[in-house]
Amino acid sequence: MRTKQLIIQTTALAMIIVLCFAVQAMWFSRKTVYVNLQEIYDRFEYSQSMQKKAEQTLTARTNIIDSLKYILEVEYRQLQSALDKSQEKRKEALVQFNQNRQEFLQKKQTFEKNNAEMLEQYDKQIWTQINKYIGDYGKEKGMGIIVGGNGDGNVMYSPGELDITEDIIAYINLKHKGV
């Protein structure tokens, strides 16, 4: 009876050891790789389309500000040439100029704030999508860890074969297209 118990315990211990080796082999067989995040961001098609969208908005807002500035400059020149007009006309022109100047400054400040918020929101959307796609890639390929570096010292050295930036760029652009 005692021999039978010893055989069962030895077999159970052997199975636990084999299981530990299997788990360890599976864990360490997962690859640790890295990507260049700036390159991915720059070459991600979604990032490029969002940048074009932002540029269009920024250009439109800049055109509006430039137009308002031009109108103010014309009004200022008219105000300068109104010195020969009556006191009442000069006062009206000055009041109108100051109102337009205030509107211009408020519009400019609002646009600057909105531009910063828009760019921050676009950037957040782009990084959210990149992170999701890189996570999907890692799961599909059975990766252990994907380290993101951007040239600021996060990855100090790695052999080139561990750099999967090109694979990630191709993958996320296909995912973005719905492929």
Image (tube, rainbow, N blue to C red):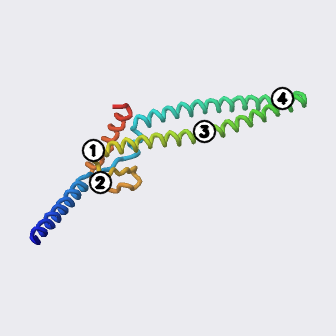
For label 2, the residue is 158
- Give the secondary structure at mark 3: helix
State the CA–CA distance, disc 2 to disc 1.
20 Å
Q: Residue at x 76, y 29 (%)?
A: 75
For label 1, the residue is 141
Residue 76 lies in quadrant: top right
For label 4, the residue is 82
Mark nearer the N terminus (4 vs 1): 4
The quarter of the picture where the N terminus appears is bottom left
Q: Residue at x 71, y 29 (%)?
A: 71
- Give the secondary structure at mark 2: loop
Q: Where is residue 18? Give x, y as percent.
A: 17, 60
Q: Is residue 14 left or right of residue 117?
A: left
Mark nearer the N terminus (4 vs 2): 4
State the CA–CA distance, disc 1 to disc 3.
40 Å
State the CA–CA distance, disc 4 to disc 1.
75 Å
Q: Which mark is residue 114?
A: 3
State the CA–CA distance, disc 4 to disc 3.
37 Å
State the CA–CA distance, disc 4 to disc 2.
72 Å
